[in-house]
Image (cartoon, rainbow, N blue to C red):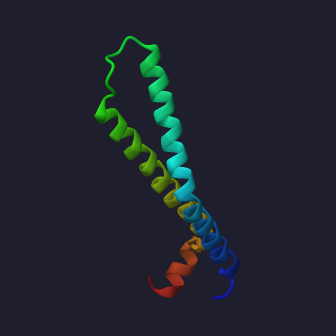
Amino acid sequence: MRENRGIAIGIAVVAFLFLASLPFVIPTTIWFALTIYAIVKGAGSAPQQPDAAAVVLTIVGIVSFFTIAIAVAITLLGRAMTPRRRRRDRGELAAAGV
């Protein structure tokens, strides 16, 4: 059962580093997105007040993106720990009485 120890440690390290970086990455990403939104809003002929729904959806989208990213990363790394199914030969099944 120790053959997956390296992969498990790798998953733990990736998860730890990703989760430790989130307090810095999420606010920075939100700031960039809202800055771009403000530039586009100021350059265009849109109404002067920002759309509250657009701001909330931007924040929800950014947080959802990072949540899905960690789930996909752990899934892809953890896939190596799952043993592959072996294909059984028909002769083996007949010999086993199945």
Residue 70, relative to residue 42: is it above or below?
below
Give the residue drawn at x 33%, y 41%: 56
Give the residue drawn at x 47%, y 48%: 65
**Residue 7: image location, x then y, percent:** 66, 74
Q: Quadrant of residue 98?
A: bottom left
71, 29: nearer the viewer: 29
Number of numbered markers = 0
**Residue 66: image location, x then y, percent:** 49, 52
Q: Quadrant of the N terminus?
A: bottom right
Q: Residue furthest front?
A: 48
Give the residue drawn at x 67%, y 87%: 2
Residue 63, relative to residue 41: is it above or below?
below
Give the residue drawn at x 56%, y 55%: 24
Residue 66 in view in this figure: yes
43, 2: nearer the viewer: 43
**Residue 51: image location, x then y, percent:** 31, 29
Left or right, 25 with reference to 97: right
Residue 79 in view in this figure: no
Residue 64, relative to residue 50: is it above or below?
below
Q: Residue furthest top?
A: 45
